[in-house]
């Protein structure tokens, strides 16, 4: 049934090992060789920061497989500390070098699979050679050693990895400064969604330097563009990753301008005998079909599996990427899927969005936590363009539900109809995802008009009045400047106190504002409900410094 | 724009209050009257057991709204302790009785909404009048009073409510016996899925009497069909609920044989001026379109909202029900959606299924818990027919993802392609839901043939050999009688030890069994992998007593 095949895989972590193991299960007779530049294969990339922090205590827990275990289970020839240095495409051989002995060898292949991953970017800063990065087990060992005895650390870059490193360095007792070029951490999130996590990091003692950059790294400090010096026994560079495409470039394979290896819908490169997957390749965005770099483990693993299917002759379909991702920071779950507002604005793509703040489970059952949600919607088609969630519990679940809805092509209003599991410990009879659907439906059918947090000042300048329908106690604790306080429960009897002209109504999160908006609309007023209420407004404003 | 409408709603909890509140938001001028037989509206039904147990300490936490708060916020005339006693359909009036004064009144309506809910069934057992039930706040007060000073309790019925009551009575320090007529608790689950929860309850000291029935209730005990007497200072009847359809029956509205009010796709009864929703009505099953009774709060709330939409002239579509449900018991999440195996078998509907045991998050990150999953699939169309999940963490998330996939019409194999949020605290790069998709795909494409736990003995009797590919240590700790132990990692070199004939392979959960199956299949053997491995087999066998 099978022709004997000779498969060489370059890179032995997520995509590569998924390819190798799946391929063996599909073809018992193939010769499968995996070469991996580092000293380990199949290690737990995503766990590395937590070993630095001591959360994952045993280093051995990071090593999910070894060359010996892979040989025994899957009859795979795994060679670590072995680098692929050149591909002879006509001959169908790949030259590999044993990094310890320096010995080189040409491995013949029927199919070559490139899964080399992505390398941490080292920004061109004087002294950058002192900065540590985190990609593999060796890097982790270096970080663990460096943390020992260190009192201060600077993390350059506040993306997901930078934030994970920050949390883990805190956990080891270091004074941590994060230097981020953007005005916010965690770029997949929009700023108003992440303001609370900024606060949590500051409360935990992190010195957050947003809109800042490091201009030099000294022996015991870094220097910022402002000239300020910040103590740094340890410097971590976490400014992103770049696809490892040098081997592909040298072999003349098509590579995108930003460095990703270009593959077709079957993960084939421009050479039909060479496949590529994982962080090294350009992926197809689920929203616009354009090429994107999305270095995430879930997609890398799936792509590896699919390459094996393709090589074994099984029909598989490419899956475009939504970029579903999550990070944990100081007990907060920060999760996103699809496009954010920044990207939609930059692309000039029409959108509207919804902010809610809902409880992770029934409010009357102990332990409910607030989840802030943002849903981005195509106003023409009601398609879901993206979502973001932040909360101490259940943010992961809601993003996974929405990611599933997006994959299936459900519209925003369809979220109202989802039938989700409810008991008071686990959710609400109207789940936060259902609530997003209700609001989407109300907006799509014109039942409610909304205004966003960053539009309020302009509306006021244009003569609109802000009616704050919260209680006087809530109003006293903090309010939008110029707002008039009429609690929703008194709105019908105090209707004559509502000033003339167009109105903005708001409550804490948007629900009472919706009720108030309906009451005022019924009396002929033009009303917009402040999306996400005072909470989203104040979070957004706090990001403006 | 709106014609003034007069709406009367009978029943002021989930469906009824959702109707009332939504209707007010859609129509500021309507007259909305809600009559509720009990002393409270809009109370937290699903929280009642937890107040009995003291988990929800304050009784006031159960009362989400009061008549006064509803009047202030929504201008609704809410009348508690008021029973609707008769409907004059021609006159379009409903007669209501004040239960305290006995005074009756005819309320005119343009639309009447029946949301009376369902009442606990009281089985016809001598002494049943001593049994307490749990439906409303008054019942809860009676239970709280009865628990005080009680040392023993018998819960009749081991459904979701019975199990919640059991947990809460345990929490109050009572010795609890559960008497269940079926051989298992929690009927929405198949027996092998729930065996571990049976064990957990027994370990917590619960006396589980399965396949048992109470024949009489005495003053301080119950008597079983076996003649045995069990001490019972307190008896709780939790054998299910029956739709409150007497008012509808008396009015000549169409009611199903099992008691549910019949409604069309707009929740209209056989009288176009009368709507009904919630636990009192017959719903449309999402799988076969047949009428079903599904007394769940999530659907009741949505239906209430939809009735308001319909009355206000908004186009809404009926949503058939999947029956997504969850219960918490002793730290276990027990969740299900769609049909189970018992129901598929009873209906003679073709199906296949998959059992897996996966970690709630990456195994190398501390705190991972096992989730047992079962996926039921239509073998012709690959449609998902149902799913069940049991685990201490993340079972709710996986059922919600699958419920979303089912609502959207995704096939079982499509679960492989879902892009779910991964970080090691929250999931796995290959999420348990993805893994179900991988297995579904392997089975659908003939890559793997499987055998179920209850088929193993027959296979052995027919001469098939069971190969246990776990380690010798695992084998020694417990194995299928007659199984031959050859660890998967030795299978290639010990191939000559595999007996002739057809084979069943298995490991602990199914993953190594799959690898072994592929190795043996490649050598020309006919192999079936034991679905869910030794864990599902032993769980299933334990339910056979």
Image (cartoon, coloured by chain):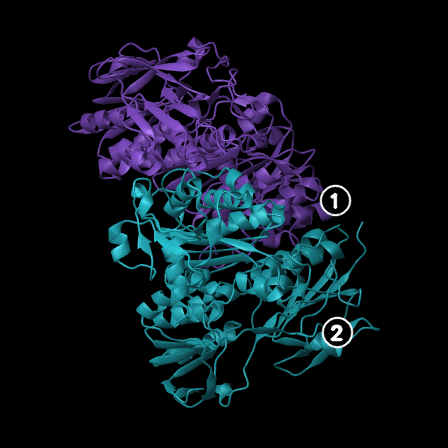
Chain colours: A cyan, B purple
Q: Residue at x 53, y 61 (%)?
A: A341
Under tag 1, what secondary structure?
loop
Q: Which mark is residue A359?
A: none
The answer to whether residue B486 is visible is no
Is B359 in front, or is A249? Answer: A249
Marks 2 and 1 in Cβ contact (< 8 Å): no
Vertical position of residue A229 compared to residue B44: above or below: below
Image coords of residue B517 (percent x, y): 65, 45
Compared across the picture, whether A283 is left or right of B84 comes to right
Under tag 2, what secondary structure?
strand
Is B367 in front, or is B149? Answer: B149
Instruction: Please give the chain letter of the residue carrying mark 1.
Output: B
Vertical position of residue B426 compared to residue B138: above or below: below
Is B355 in front, or is B260? Answer: B260
Compared across the picture, whether A93 is left or right of A74 comes to right
Vertical position of residue A13 compared to residue B324: above or below: below
User: Residue B280 appears in which quarter of the rendering?
Assistant: top left
Image coords of residue B325 (percent x, y): 45, 34
Instruction: Please give the chain letter of the residue carrying mark 2.
Output: A
Image coords of residue A345 (percent x, y): 57, 64
Q: Which mark is residue A94?
A: 2
Q: Do marks 2 and 1 share a chain? A: no
The crowding category of the residue bearing disc 1, from other C-alpha atoms within 10 Å (few below 14, some 14 to 19, many at least 20), is few
The answer to whether residue A236 is visible is yes
Q: State the separation of the CA atoms marked 2 and 1.
A: 33 Å
Image coords of residue B331 (percent x, y): 35, 42
Q: Which mark is residue B524?
A: 1
Q: Residue at x 70, y 39 (%)?
A: B526
The crowding category of the residue bearing disc 2, from other C-alpha atoms within 10 Å (few below 14, some 14 to 19, many at least 20), is many
Q: Residue at x 72, y 74 (%)?
A: A248
């Amino acid at each position: 049934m099978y022709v004997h095949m000779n498969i060489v895989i370059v890179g032995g972590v997520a995509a590569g090992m998924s390819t190798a193991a799946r391929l063996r299960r599909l073809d018992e007779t193939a010769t499968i060789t995996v070469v991996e530049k580092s000293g380990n294969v199949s290690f737990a990339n995503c766990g590395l920061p937590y070993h630095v922090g001591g959360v994952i205590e045993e280093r051995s827990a990071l090593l999910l497989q070894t060359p010996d275990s892979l040989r025994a289970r899957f009859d795979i020839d795994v060679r670590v500390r072995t680098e692929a240095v050149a591909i002879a495409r006509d001959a169908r051989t790949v030259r590999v070098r044993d990094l310890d002995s320096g010995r080189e060898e040409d491995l013949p292949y029927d199919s070559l699979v490139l899964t080399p991953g992505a390398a941490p970017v080292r920004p061109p800063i004087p002294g950058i050679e002192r900065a540590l990065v985190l990609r593999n087990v060796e890097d982790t060992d270096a970080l663990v050693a460096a943390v020992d005895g260190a009192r201060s650390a600077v993390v350059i870059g506040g993306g997901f990895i930078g934030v994970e490193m920050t949390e883990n360095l805190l956990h080891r007792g270091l004074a941590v400064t994060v230097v981020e070029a953007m005005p916010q951490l965690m770029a997949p999130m929009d700023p108003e969604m992440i303001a609370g996590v900024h606060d949590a990091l500051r409360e935990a003692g992190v010195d957050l330097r947003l809109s800042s950059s490091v201009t030099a790294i000294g022996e015991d400090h870094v220097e910022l563009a402002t000239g300020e010096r910040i103590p740094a026994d340890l410097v971590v560079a976490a400014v992103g990753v770049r696809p490892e495409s040098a081997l592909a470039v040298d072999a003349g394979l098509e590579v995108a301008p930003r460095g990703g290896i270009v593959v077709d819908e079957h993960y084939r490169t421009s050479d039909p005998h060479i496949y590529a997957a994982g962080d090294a390749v350009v992926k197809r965005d689920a929203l616009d079909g354009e090429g994107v770099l999305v270095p995430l483990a879930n997609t890398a693993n799936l792509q590896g599996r699919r390459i094996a299917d393709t090589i074994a002759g099984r029909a598989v379909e490419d899956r475009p990427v939504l970029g579903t991702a999550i990070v944990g920071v100081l007990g907060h779950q920060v999760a996103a899927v699809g496009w954010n507002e920044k990207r939609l604005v930059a692309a000039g793509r029409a959108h509207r969005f919804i902010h809610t703040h809902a409880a992770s489970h029934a409010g009357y059952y102990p332990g409910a936590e607030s989840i802030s949600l943002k849903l981005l919607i195509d106003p023409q088609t009601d398609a879901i363009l993206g979502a973001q969630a932040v909360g101490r519990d259940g943010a992961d679940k809601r993003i996974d539900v929405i990611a599933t809805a997006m994959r299936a092509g459900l519209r925003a209003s369809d979220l109202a109809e989802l039938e989700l599991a409810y008991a008071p410990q686990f959710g609400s009879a109207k789940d936060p995802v259902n609530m997003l659907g209700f609001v989407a439906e109300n907006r799509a059918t014109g039942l409610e008009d909304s205004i966003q947090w960053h539009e309020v000042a302009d509306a006021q300048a244009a003569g609109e009045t802000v009616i704050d329908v919260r209680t006087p106690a809530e109003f006293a604790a903090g309010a939008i400047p110029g707002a008039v306080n009429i609690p929703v429960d008194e709105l019908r009897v105090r209707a004559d106190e509502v000033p003339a002209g167009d109105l903005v109504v708001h409550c804490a999160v948007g629900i009472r504002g919706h009720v108030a908006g309906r009451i005022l609309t019924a009396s002929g007023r033009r009303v917009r409900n402040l999306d996400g209420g005072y909470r989203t407004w104040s979070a957004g404003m706090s990001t403006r410094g």
